Every structure is written in C-alpha cells, then in structure tokens.
Amino acid sequence: MTISILYIPYEQLVTTHNQNVAYENVKVNALIPGLPKILQSCASPGFYRSASTDTEINDALQAMFVQATAVARLTQ
C-alpha cells in the first residue's frame, strides 16, 4: 500500500472581533506546529508534499498522480 499526502498549510481566518473565529484560530494554530512532521511520517517514503499557492497545489497534485501511476500495477 502506498499513502500519498499533500499538506496545505492552514491560513488564519480574518476576524472582526468574532469570538468563534478567534477561538478557531487559536485552536487550529495550537495543533499546526507538529502537524507536517506527523503527516510526513504517515506518508510512504517520497510521497509527502507541502503546497501553499494555487500553482504549488496544482503542481503537487499532478506530480502525485504521475508518481502514483508509476508504481501502480494490475493484479488478478
């Protein structure tokens, strides 16, 4: 089994003194520092990518598809 992971970093929500949004930003940001390392450990070797921009995300998804099909094999 091969596991491929694309990590897209969380961007804080803009808040105009909304307590729910501010609470979410605090909770999510508390989890983020260790998340990339954990995700990388879950991915198969060489199958972890991180991307932030639209172009990076598109490129990463295309690369992941090519990489996945290169190792895929049909069995009966």
Image (spheres, grey):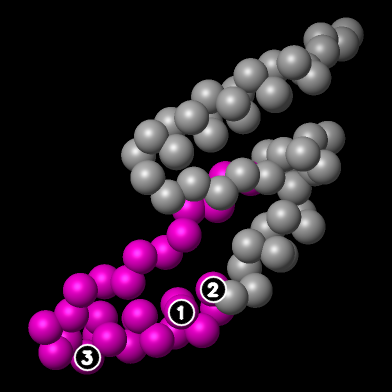
* Residue pictured at 48% horizontal, 53% vertical: 8
Q: Which of these two is toward me, 6 or 54?
A: 54
User: Would you place residue 62 above or below residue 1 in this image?
Assistant: above
Disc 2 target residue: 32
Q: Position of residue 70 (x, y in %)?
A: 75, 16
Residue stretch rendered in magenta on the structure: 5-32
Q: Nearer the viewer, mark 3 or mark 2?
A: 2
Give the structural element (helix, strand or loop) at label 2.
Answer: helix
Q: Are marks 3 and 1 in contact (CB under 8 Å)?
A: no
Return the disc, 3 or 2, that comes first in the chain's sequence.
Answer: 3
Q: Count the numbered circles shown.
A: 3
| Residue for badge 3 | 19
Q: Earlier in the sequence, mark 3 or mark 1?
A: 3
Q: CA distance from mark 2 to mark 1?
A: 5 Å
Q: Is residue 4 left or right of residue 44?
A: left
Question: Which amino acid type is shown beneath numbered disc 1?
Answer: Asn
Q: Is residue 53 left or right of residue 66?
A: left
Q: Secondary structure at mark 3?
A: helix
In this figure, which residue is indicated by the disc labeled 1? 29
